[in-house]
Image (cartoon, grey):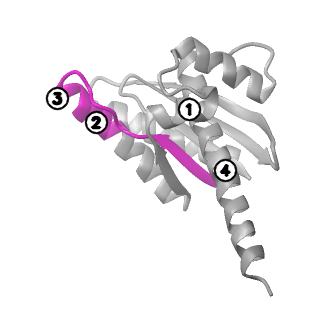
Amino acid sequence: MRVLGIDPGSVATGYGVISVEGSAMRRIAGGTIRARGDTLADRLAHLQRELARAIAELAPECAALESIFSAKNARSALVLGHARGVALAACGSAGLGSAEYTPAQVKVAVTGYGRAEKSQVMLMVQRLLGLSAPPPSDEADALAVAICHGMSVRVHVRVRTALALERAP
């Protein structure tokens, strides 16, 4: 299964695609989309085009996004909400189902601790994906979201299998 992870941002949006095969995960690709344009509309249109290009090129089967957290001010939360909306729309336009995870859920899945520091998340992403160096911050966050989703799907599959075996005659 190929999972697209997205860490939406108004200035920089991280993305990363991983392959999940059994318990093995590996990085397919990733990067950071930097805001371009003079207006919010221009920046959001650029984000939409770049996400659509990445989805078409990398062919993920599903997507996962970091859910919104409490921002320090209303304007920041609103702009972040716009970027998240664009990311969800890009996934929806491509026919990708999407899941959302809180920052704490992602940190628990990747590090085992919901209040892990950013550097700890980056290091664990490197280790879990067998990378030679930690990826850049925004990409690492997106890969962490993809890892969280990959782990979540594996757990759901195991639970469904166990329940089916339990019900079998």
Residue 60 is marked as: 4
Label 3 residue SS: helix
Taking the spot 79% from the left edge, 21% from the top edge, the residue there is 131
Q: Amino acid at mark 2?
A: Ala
Q: Is residue 63 magenta?
A: yes
Distance from the alpha carbon under mark 2 to that under mark 1: 35 Å
Q: In the image, is residue 9 above or below residue 120? A: below
Magenta-colored span: 62-83
Q: Earlier in the sequence, mark 4 or mark 1?
A: 4
Question: Does the magenta portion include 102?
Answer: no
Residue picked out by circle 1 = 108
Q: CA distance from mark 3 to mark 2?
A: 19 Å
- Distance (Cα) linking label 4 and label 2: 26 Å
Q: Which residue is label 2 attached to?
A: 41
Above or below 103: residue 100: below
Residue at the image point whose x is 63% and y is 30% from the top: 110
What residue is shown at x 70% (from left), y 53% (from top)? Answer: 154
Q: Residue furthest left?
A: 74
**Mark-to-mark CA distance, 1 and 3:** 27 Å
Q: Earlier in the sequence, mark 3 or mark 2?
A: 2
Q: Earlier in the sequence, mark 1 or mark 3?
A: 3
Do the numbered discs 4 and 1 sit on residues whose CB atoms are within 8 Å? no
Judge left or right: residue 93 versus residue 25: left
Residue 116 or residue 146, whichever sits in front: 116
Residue 111, position as x, y percentages in the image: 62, 26
Q: Which residue is mark 3?
A: 74
Label 4 Cα crowd, 10 Å radius (few <14 / some 14-19 / many 20+):
many
